[in-house]
Image (tube, grey):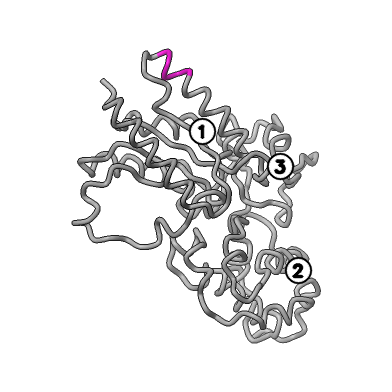
Amino acid sequence: MQTTETKFKNLEKWEGMLAKCIRCGYCYEHCPMFKFTRWESDAPRGKNILAHGLLTGSIELTREIAEKSFSCFFCKRCEAACSSGVQITDIMLDLRRDLVELGYKKDIGTISTTDRSCARCLQCVRACPHDAREYIDLQGIVVDPVKCKSCGICVEVCPIEAVSIPLPFGTDTENLDQKAAEFLNSTESAKVICFACNWSYHPDIQNSKMPESETHDKEYEILVNLCGGRLDKNLLLTPFLNQAWGILVGVCPDGECTHDGNVAALKRVTKMKETLEALDINPDRIHLVQIPRGDKQLFQAEIDTFMEKINQLGPIR
């Protein structure tokens, strides 16, 4: 059992805030990690409990515990839903600072990593919106585990795929490719894939799974890609290769994306429109919309409008 000799100097100031959590669980439905694993320890409430246990010495610090603390996509939807006003994101950042001082800082959680195949082109360093990456002679690309917000933009800009996120929680391109293909090939009425970042989409649209008898005629599927900046050309191409009629991309409004991912997404969608046009396919089959945080009515309205247009266009022939 860990003793109080292990100091969490940065975490100490949050002792009162940690005690404010009433364990209601409202944060669960908004957390992409919990929705993927269904583990209590991945939910914001669970992390709050772990942080309190580390601070009081009732929980032993292990690499597994540290990994939970370094796993977050910083959407802050949990804080918006918290009825007690617990600032869990800031708490986790200070816990990370303590863990770094204790030696936990490499290849852990959702912190992006760079393997030895890195060409040192420094594109990821220049693209990082949080200044979390730097090149250090003899060490290569080094990532600051406190500054890194796991937005994944560095993953998408790397020309040789040397950058990755150890624990993507289903948000990586490979997993999203698979989900898109499975939906389009297994649902008879499937027509559209909607890519939505966790900052702009409304989480309650996917919270519950309806019986298969009520979803067999579903025309669209919403896939959460965490940030529009993580959409690459291959991910935007996959649905069309699997007979999709169209793609809708939801991002944050200008000035609201903390990663400028909406700007990157617009560029990629524009490129895909040019590709479709070159293939004599209507470029309106891919469309980007900006959705303010939590505006589920607007998002659903945009989906409905896009589906009307797609149904008018019909399948790609």
Residue 275 in the magenta stretch? The answer is yes
Instruction: Choose the circle earlier in sequence order: 3 or 2.
Output: 2
Disc on the earlier residue, 1 or 2: 2
Q: Identify the disc placed on residue 232.
A: 1
Indicate the amino acid at tag 3. Answer: Pro
Quarter location, residue 253: top right
Magenta stretch bounds: 274-278
Q: Residues within 10 Å of mark 2 (few under 14, many from 20)?
A: some
Name the side, left or right, on which 272 lies relative to 156: left
Q: Position of residue 85 (x, y in %)?
A: 66, 72
For the point 53% across and 24% down, which residue is it? 270
Marks 1, 2: nearer the viewer: 1
Residue shown at 51%/37% (left/top)? 289
> Do the CB atoms of the residues marked 1 and 3 lie less than 8 Å apart?
no
Vertically, is 34 above or below 202?
below
| Secondary structure mostly taken by the magenta-highlighted segment of the chain | helix
Question: What residue is shown with label 3?
Answer: 129
* Amino acid type at mark 1: Asp
Quadrant of the image containing the N terminus = bottom right
Report the disc number at residue 98: 2
Tell me if mark 1 has few (under 14), some (14-19) or many (20+) residues whose alpha carbon lies within 10 angstroms of its own. Answer: some
Quadrant in which the C terminus is drawn: top left
Tag 2: residue type?
Answer: Asp
Seen at 74% across and 67% down, the residue is 94
Determine the secondary structure under disc 2. Answer: helix
Q: Quadrant of residue 211?
A: bottom left
Q: Are marks 1 and 2 in contact (CB under 8 Å)?
A: no
